[in-house]
Image (spheres, coloured by chain):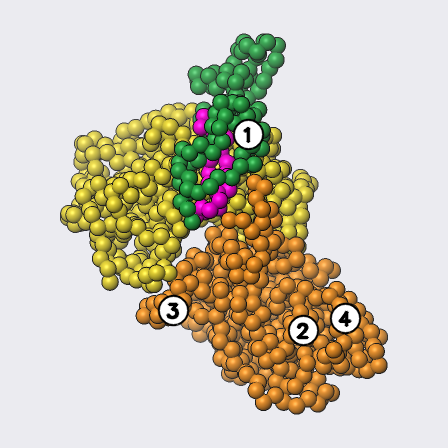
Amino acid sequence: MQNYDIVVIGGGPAGLAAAAEAKRSGVDSILILERDHELGGILNQCIHNGFGLHTFKEELTGPEYAKRFMDQVFELGIEYKLNTMVMDITENKVVTAMNKTDGMFQIQAKAVILAMGCRERPRGALNIPGYRPAGIFSAGTAQRLVNIEGYLPGREVVILGSGDIGLIMARRMTLEGAKVKVVAELMPYSGGLKRNIVQCLDDYGIPLKLSHTVVDIEGKERVTGITIAEVGPDMKPISGTEEHYSCDTLLLSVGLLPENELSKTAGVELSTITSGPVVNDALETNVEGIFACGNVLHVHDLVDFVSQEAQNAGKNAAKYVKEGREASGRIIDIKAVDGVRYTVPCTIRPDQMDDTVTVRFRVGKVFKNSAITMYFGDEQVLKRKKQIMAPGEMEQVIIDKKKLAEFGDISDITIKIESV
Amino acid sequence: MEVRNLTCIGCPMGCQLEVTIDQGTVVSVTGNTCKRGDDYARKEVTNPTRIVTSTVPVIGGKIAMVSCKTASDIPKDKIFACMEEINQVTVAAPVKVGDVILKDICHTGVDIIATKDVDIA
Amino acid sequence: MIYDVVIIGAGVSGSAIARELSKYELNTVVLEKFEDVCSGTSKANSAIVHAGFDAAEGSLMAKLNVEGNEMMGDLARDLDIPFKRNGSLVVCIHKEELPGLQVLYDRGVANGVKDLKILSREEVLAMEPNLSDDVQGALYAPTGGIICPFILNIAMAENANVNGVDFRFNTEVEGFRKEGDTWVVRTNNGEYKTRYVVNAAGVYADVLHNMVSEDKIHITPRRGDYCLLDKEMGAHVSHTIFPQPTKLGKGVLVSPTIHGNLIVGPTAIDIEDREGTATTADGINDLIAKAGMHVKNLPVGRKVITSFAGLRAHEDHHEFIIGECKDAPGFIDCSGIESPGLTSSPAIGRMVADIVVDLAKPAKKSDWVGTRTGILNPSEMSLEERNALIKEKPEYGQIICRCESISEGEILDAIHRPLGARSLDGVKRRTRAGMGRCQGGFCSPRVMEIIHRELGIPVEKVTKSGGESVIAPELSKNRKGGEA
């Protein structure tokens, strides 16, 4: 059994930032375990620009953004293993992993940072009827084939789902010579950024059909056609609205799911809303010494926020390694109600928390001319007007330790959306 | 007088902008709810530009493709011409981030540069 | 060359027959229209080893079901097939249905099903706490089981192949003629001359039969839609839960699978198209509604990882038709093989082989090998065993399919063993790579690369399941095939 102070599971943007920050916080014994053949995670296939505006005040491509954090890891001399799959994590923080050269090995860690990212929701999870031919890809799989492997998955494309990956792939396939015929979105609004709708669809004359879904997939060997139909308020297809598109490819961009199978092996409690771990202000899970950050915790809109959150997790993991668990103190629940779907973190330790804690969340539907409000106990402490809020974008509020202290022994903080 | 309709990309509002143009000069922008919409509309109708990102095959590299981009934005109507030039080239490993892959693409004065390091296989 | 036996169809029946015939000095070839074994009805079904109380007393179906069930344990052991007798329950949720359980019980006893028992509400709830609150009682059949239908089929075919049976894939039978006593089987890949023909063509068995016989039969493709749920739900029930059967079949069952998922299905919809395996929204919705009647707290909507449809070869009289065609000597039918066909397959193989052996009177082989070692399952190994394996074959240390933890070593084995995989689905059915919750999103590009490397098939020609099912049909950027 090997020993490390901190084992970071995943070498994508979250894992890299967490490891670097842990090292800067004074912990030397750190190991990153990455399943792919290079660090950087999904950013390696996100070759488009638009990353890093918040962090670096410039627009980088995914690989460039990843390289900035990889360079930090290299410069700090942090150890990492590639092509290494973590098979199991125990509650006692024994990490079992495997690769070709080391075989199967175990590490006793003092702290573990979960940074495994997320995966795409597959066709099967949607119960789209029809045949099961070749030519149906999740958008990210198609992205890998095009950008990493150098293949064109098809020539005539229909896309279901207007998440950002789907929009980005609409442009990417078009630039590679494919014809993207339509993007269908089940919801009455797009989950993607406005900028992507304009620059990935409008620029190329690709129609976006809101409140539409795929009702049939044709083709026994390879996709030959897709039928879409409008859906009513009940999300059920409306008979008579069917439109047929002949095509050889269906891309699915229908949501991302935090990948927490390993977290479960360690007994980490998961949120039914985010599918990610339930964490406190230190981004620590219910299992002492196991922290989480990035898309494994909740699916982010911008990688900048992943990096910030991961640095926080890295700092807190280092603190835990150096100082151990602080005496248990008061815990305040953060309640997400009235349009706020969830918050990360879910609880705050008013005595041990940092001077400020950023609470991130998403809203459940599009809100116009509304306000984010926060209550310490029953008292409103924040009312921030927003012209628009949409489920596709994360929102945040900041909790100030001193201000919270003024409220004494409250049991909960509430965050909600209210009309102005 | 020409009227063009745009969707603002400044924020999720996606304001529907109506831009009135007279002989290449913007006369008015309406529909925006903030200054960013006005700025965006004026730029978009007079000189729309985009960063183009793509990939180029690497010969003798650890991986098959290297990602690349226009070093700065290029006129929007040159995107496809730019892609055609990108699609004709290959590079030899090793490649470093920032290496010029193609100089002065489509006479824009803008280079295509690598956005990823690729080592020799 | 004149074969002794041409078997048409490499499904579970054809493969079982091939394995039984491989015990004899016979020149046998199996012709399969698809690119792999187990590509039709055998690949899309409930994956249940039925106890045998459903089929009518005295029917061939009943006899072969019970025989097949009894044979399955030894077969699974000999051929390394994942199989477990988890027991099945026919559950009543209305008091009026209770007498029906007795009918099933009596029929089962008459069919020779062992250890049947009628359970009270309390007894059955103690065994399955997630049954509907309305449950009134159940018929318990401890001999019922769950099996990997792919490996059952593949293992029998592999074993037949190792013992000398040829398999020709992408070979579709187009017609027959007689030259004296010799059958000439016309296919898209040339003609095959043979003394005996075995028709194990699944949903096409009637078409082939009717080409040679005036005594016409008729098969209806009866589509069944299924949902497969995440392994998180695999322990929701531990037995196979059936409702009371209707004339359309055994109804919508809820069962753990041998690999730890939960399966719900099938529907029963008669269709025309013999390859009409498209699921429908109505079918899936119907399934979800019906499954929830007997098993509670089924999160079918949220935990489904895939849905699919299979076709049963439903013969008009709901009976297996096995025997030499009266007006076509040497043409042996094995048709109408619908549920419990998978269960019956070992017995079907033996019965058809006996018929051929009676006619051909071949000698028994002295060097027949009756056992097969399956693809390793490293997850069952200890840390030390696994390390020893990786030291010897490092590919076993490289995980390719994250969801099912399948390594490159297992995939290489699947490709290089007898009748090895040549497509993504071929790898999936042999190893489970791509069968997990992400449904191949992560591993399919990697498996394509391995198929390319190991078999020399250009990546842009690698298929999902043969034919036109190429996955990434073009190289981008004017790249030349085979480069980088």
Spatial separation of the CA atoms under disc 2 and disc 3: 36 Å
Residue that carries the numbered disc 3 in the rendered image? C392
Q: Chain of mark 3?
A: C
Residue that carries the numbered disc 2 in the rendered image? C30
User: Looking at this view, is A135 or C253 the one in front?
Assistant: A135
Residue that carries the numbered disc 1 in the rendered image? B82
User: Looking at this view, is C63 or A96 the one in front?
Assistant: A96
Q: Between disc 2 and disc 3, whose residue precedes?
A: 2
Q: Amino acid at mark 3?
A: Glu
Looking at the rendered image, the disc whose residue lies closer to the viewer, 2 or 1, is: 1
Residue that carries the numbered disc 4 in the rendered image? C191
For residue C94: magenta? no
Mark 4 neighbour class, 10 Å CA radius: few under 14, some 14 to 19, many 20 or more: some
Looking at the rendered image, the disc whose residue lies closer to the viewer, 2 or 3, is: 3
Spatial separation of the CA atoms under disc 1 and disc 3: 50 Å
Q: Are marks 4 and 3 in contact (CB under 8 Å)?
A: no
